[in-house]
Image (cartoon, grey):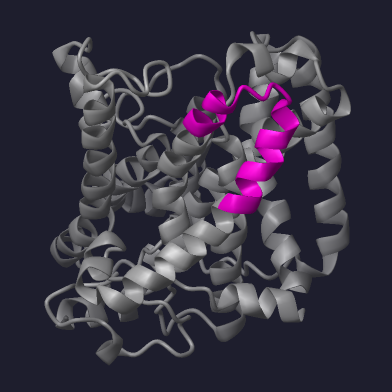
């Protein structure tokens, strides 16, 4: 527990949990917590399943299909890069001198990598069991027919997405944490060359970097480190929030139109624009948090705490389950599933989060990497069992 407290004071790296960092002022801390729940809720839109007959590129439902592309292929693709930048920013808030690599890796293995293994393995076993009795074929990738390399990816995201697809982010984040001393050293000595190289690698379409599944994560994490080490004023653009949000929405609409008209096999220039918006759009979302945190809704969302991590880890298996049930109903009107699944999903996630946290706190601590429910302003060391160390397709 002492390791956690020391690490939190020296610059924690909790991308989808509770900010506990005395080096981050209250406004920034609240805005980070707000962005987590907003972005993770947006990431849900990216993973709503559909079959070939209901791909948005068929144009069966007109504007509704364009809206699906706008939300899942443009606007909320910003989520992962933005969360990555937050992680890198928090990790080095104490500077290079306050960074303890061994303690950081030990802590993050429990708070990032262990939840990845638990949640993904649980869904892998569930998929294996369903497929063994003839349920779920076509809804999940079959382990029965996978090669050894395929199984390694399904279980550990070795080369491709894991069974619980969104959790590739936790895998990539842990890799970034392992690389963090090297990234910080490069950013200290050759910041522009380092960032420009990583940005170029993130933008190039159809390229595999192998060490991370999503290249934008590596750049965004490094940019967060840069902002932290060079004490960049991350509130400097707040006065331009209306313009920034308007540009984000406008660029997302233009990109969605280009994707909708050219998809599903997008030309390289569209892919390049999507990669660029996913990275640059993070600034727009951050500016959005400035006015939003001043509202009662924003304040309430900023205090949801560990719910954001629960949503992130649990939403995809539930969406797959809902889609399997939907397939048995014989109803062909896909917009009903799209909207209905969202209306059911979020209450189920909120209730299950509250139930497990209240009735099985030790299990909850393991599943959430020790994240507590409350926000940083009210978090207490006594809220976490002593034996647990908190912390897009």
Above or below: residue 384 compared with residue 47: below
Residue in the image at 78% along x and 36% along y: 252
274 or 316, which lies in front?
316
Left or right placement of residue 56 versus residue 155 in this view: right
260 or 109, which lies in front?
260
Residue in the image at 79% along x and 45% along y: 248
Residue 335, magenta (yes or no): yes
Above or below: residue 221 compared with residue 48: below
Q: Quadrant of residue 74?
A: top right
Spot occupied by residue 148 in the image (x, y as percentages of width and height): 14, 15
Magenta segment, which residues? 323-344
Residue in the image at 22% along x and 30% along y: 129
Spot occupied by residue 237 in the image (x, y as percentages of width and height): 75, 64
> Dividing the image into 4 quarters, which one contains the N terminus?
bottom left
Q: Residue furthest front?
A: 329
Residue 21 in sight in this render: yes
Above or below: residue 330 compared with residue 369: above
Spot occupied by residue 344 in the image (x, y as percentages of width and height): 59, 52
Residue in the image at 36% along x and 28% along y: 161
């Amino acid at each position: 527990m002492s390791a956690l407290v020391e690490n939190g004071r020296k610059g924690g790296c909790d991308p989808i949990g509770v900010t506990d960092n005395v080096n981050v002022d209250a406004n920034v801390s609240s805005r980070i917590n707000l962005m987590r729940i907003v972005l993770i809720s947006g990431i849900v839109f990216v993973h709503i399943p559909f079959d070939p007959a209901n791909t948005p590129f068929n144009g069966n439902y007109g504007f509704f299909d364009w809206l699906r592309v706008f939300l899942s292929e443009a606007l909320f693709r910003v989520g992962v890069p933005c969360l990555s930048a937050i992680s890198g920013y928090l990790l080095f808030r104490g500077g290079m001198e306050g960074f303890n690599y061994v303690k950081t890796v030990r802590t993050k293995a429990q708070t990032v990598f262990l939840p990845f293994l638990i949640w993904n393995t649980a869904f892998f076993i569930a998929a294996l069991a369903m497929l063994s009795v003839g349920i779920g074929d076509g809804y999940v990738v079959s382990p029965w027919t996978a090669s050894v390399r395929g199984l390694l990816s399904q279980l550990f995201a070795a080369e491709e997405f894991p069974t619980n697809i969104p959790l590739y982010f936790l895998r990539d984040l842990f890799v970034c944490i392992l690389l963090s001393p090297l990234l910080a050293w490069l950013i200290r000595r050759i910041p522009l060359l380092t960032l420009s190289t990583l940005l170029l690698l993130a933008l190039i379409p159809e390229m595999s970097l192998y060490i991370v599944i999503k290249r934008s994560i590596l750049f965004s994490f490094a940019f967060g480190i840069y902002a932290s080490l060079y004490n960049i004023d991350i509130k400097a653009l707040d006065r331009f929030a209306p313009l920034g949000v308007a540009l984000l929405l406008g660029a997302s609409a233009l990109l969605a139109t280009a994707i909708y008209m050219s998809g599903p096999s997008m030309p390289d220039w569209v892919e390049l624009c999507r990669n660029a918006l996913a990275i640059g759009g993070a600034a727009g979302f951050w500016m959005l948090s400035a006015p939003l945190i001043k509202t009662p809704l924003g304040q309430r969302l900023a205090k949801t705490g560990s719910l954001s991590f629960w949503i992130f880890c649990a939403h995809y298996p539930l969406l797959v389950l809902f889609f399997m049930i939907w397939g048995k109903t014989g109803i062909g009107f896909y917009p009903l599933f799209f909207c209905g699944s969202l209306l059911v999903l979020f209450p189920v996630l909120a209730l299950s989060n509250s139930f497990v946290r209240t009735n099985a706190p030790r299990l909850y601590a393991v599943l959430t990497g020790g994240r507590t429910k409350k926000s940083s302003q009210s978090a207490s060391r006594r809220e976490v069992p002593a034996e647990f160390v908190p912390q897009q397709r």
